[in-house]
Image (cartoon, rainbow, N blue to C red):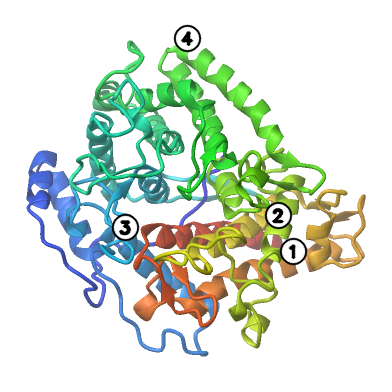
Amino acid sequence: MSEKLPILPVASSSQKPLSFRRTISSPLRATSLLALGGLAALTLTSLATSSRSICSRTSHSGKEDSLGAWIEKQAKISWWSLLDNVGPTAGAKPGLVIASPSRSHPDYFYTWTRDSAITFGTIFDRFQPSNISSNGATLRHADSSLEPLLREFVASQRELQLVKNPSGSFTDGGLGEPKFMVDGTAFKGSWGRPQNDGPPLRAMVMTRYASYLLDRSAPEDETYITSHLYDATKLMSPGSVLKSDLEYVAHNWNKDSFDLWEEISGPHFFTLLVSHRSLAVGAALADRLQDQGAAKFYLAQADLIQKKLDSFWLPSKNYIQASLPSSKFGRSGLDSAVLLAVLKAGDLGEESWGVAGERMLATVEKYVKGFKDLYPLNEGGKRKEWNGALAVGRYTEDVYDGDGKSKANPWFIATFAVSEVAFKILTHLETTSVIRVTDVSLDFWKRFFPSAEAGDVYSRGAIDGVFEDVTKKLELWADGFLTVGKTFEGEGGAFSEQFGRIDGTSKGAKHLTWSYGSFLDAINARKHYHHLRNQHRR
């Protein structure tokens, strides 16, 4: 994203969760620690011991628990649960992320490049110091104990890039392979491949780390960048994981690939937007590393992607479609993939692909509304405490039920994504102190102020108080999607992939890594908004 967000405080590595959810022994842990050296080994041992379990709590879903209290507890559970799915304690090679411990019905016991990059994006948010100023106030956050884990991720991805697989080899398409076995070997079964969103997402995380190392500017950091991340003297060099990903993206973004749901092949908004962002930030890093030729080429490709992205906007229907054209696949194109794309690679403001831009506002409104009558659990008394929020899924035409094809269910990823989007809209409004209603965004604002009309401008502190009223209702709506998650979480705060469309019971893969990460991302956005709001009220 264009702005680093402060993170909820986390328990230190010495604070042990109350009970173990699962323990998977593996000889890979010892190998990993010896390779890292004494201090890193000690850090990771402490981290692993404390993170590979899940808190059990009493009165977890009791009415006496406020949303804020639940979030505080669930933040710790989700963090430890996310770490449970990384490396040897999860039964995987060091640095590899399993999608889920589920090995049957469905079998998600693999490592996906996309999911791994997204997970380490969440981890990096806790690692990197964040300085956010508002009216002179600064928030700082850092957890340096996570750096050995980040380096395990880098090492694991360097190895995966060199694994020959059904998509190809290192130099001829292999980087587009979507998933691997948890021991780092190739998955050779039939699958939707290639998937070209993995390399740009991974490049975005690696770019953040490389930039951090450059800022830290220790002599050994520069050496590490050259030998592990970005060798400016070569185009694609084995071991230069970031540079290789950027080259892959720059030369393959215009080729059809499967979408993030692994179902349809074609041009996809999610894939292209993360490709655009990776090349833009990659170009800035290349310039810092005196690789001006690459920087120029990456920016040129990013500009071409930007032009392609414009074709995903459907002015006649007033929303951003997920694939091009979505009608070809029997879909409307209203898809949570669009929200996830903007969250991972969009801007924070009102730009064309900004989270608070009129196109995004219109798309969010139509996407959420599509689920109003789709799931039976959205009807009835529970909706009152959700403040107008709904349980939402991937897309309305979805038929994947978590183990086969029938009637699809709501997803935690999608539901928490709407909350994160809403809080980031609020953050933008808190920064600008003004709401501008356009023809495109009108329906979104009418949800919170039915009298809204195109052309209206609502400013903070105005006599009519509309700005304050709308932002208050938008905040309640954002909290409502978190409350949906609170309502249907599994035992002990577990987040599966899906929850049943009728009764909300856990469905699909258990302990889905991305579900935990999406919750953490949403509450981080909430934390940042609350900080800015409270500063303005002082």
Residue on which disc 4 sits: 293
Point out residue 205 in the picture as x, y percentages from the top left corner: 41, 38
Choose the circle earlier in sequence order: 3 or 4: 3
Choose the circle earlier in sequence order: 1 or 2: 2
Choose the circle earlier in sequence order: 2 or 4: 4
Question: In percent of the image, x 37 and y 50: which residue is there?
Answer: 123
81 sits left or right of 296 in the view: left
Q: Amino acid at mark 2?
A: Glu
Asked which quadrant contains residue 159, the reply is top left
User: How far apart, in angstroms, are the residues tagged by discs 3 and 2?
Assistant: 40 Å
Up-down relation of residue 234 to residue 420 (above or below): above
80 sits left or right of 474 in the view: left
207 sits left or right of 355 in the view: left
User: How far apart, in angstroms, are the residues tagged by discs 2 and 4?
Assistant: 40 Å
Residue on which disc 1 sits: 471
Q: Which mark is residue 108?
A: 3
User: How far apart, in angstroms, are the residues tagged by discs 3 and 4?
Assistant: 41 Å
Residue on which disc 2 sits: 430
Q: Nearer the viewer, mark 1 or mark 2?
A: 1
* Residue 305 seen: yes
Q: Are marks 3 and 2 in contact (CB under 8 Å)?
A: no
